[in-house]
Image (spheres, rainbow, N blue to C red):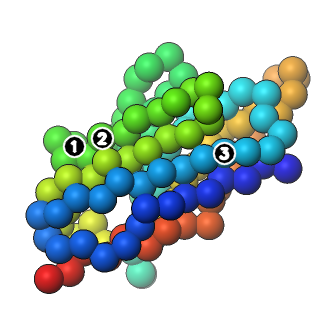
Amino acid sequence: QVQLVESGGGLVQPGGSLRLSCAASGTIYDIYNMGWYRQAPGKARELVALDNTGGSTDYADSVKGRFTISRDVAKHTVDLLMNSLKLEDTAVYYCKANVRINTGWATYDYWGRGTQVTVSS
């Protein structure tokens, strides 16, 4: 009913940049927060950046000053510009959206399939 599709992952050298994009489609009445998480092998999934309804944003301490999240609320899209990439940024990056599917009170979290980001020299 709701699909999130990520794009933009790939291989990049340390110090380089990548832009990730995510588009949500399907049965969407409204989306509250929308953003990015990542998971490296053997590690837990962690928040990278989140855009909240109302204009506030949250960033992991490890990416502050390097990554920038941007969102088009009307288009149900969110981007993540990653600058000054480091080896430790290597992970699968997942898009997440908290979706209101009708006029009721309930919202649901939906996840994309993930896109691989590899930082290597």
**In the picture provided, is 94 more to the left or to the right than 112?**
left
Q: Residues within 10 Å of mark 1 (few under 14, many from 20)?
A: few
Which mark identifies residue 88? none
Which mark identifies residue 24? 3
Q: CA distance from mark 3 to mark 2?
A: 19 Å
Q: Residues within 10 Å of mark 3 (few under 14, many from 20)?
A: many
The image quarter in which residue 116 lies: bottom left
Residue at figure coordinates x 27%, y 53% from the top left? 82
Q: Earlier in the sequence, mark 1 or mark 3?
A: 3
**In the picture provided, is 41 more to the left or to the right than 24?**
left
Name the amino acid, label 3.
Answer: Ala
Q: Nearer the viewer, residue 107 or 112?
A: 112
- Horizontal and vertical percent for residue 100? 76, 31
Reading the image, the residue beneath label 2 is 68
Q: Earlier in the sequence, mark 3 or mark 2?
A: 3
The reply to whether residue 106 is in sight is no
- Horizontal and vertical percent for residue 103? 87, 21
Reading the image, the residue beneath label 1 is 64
Residue at figure coordinates x 50%, y 61% from the top left? 7
Name the amino acid, label 1.
Answer: Lys
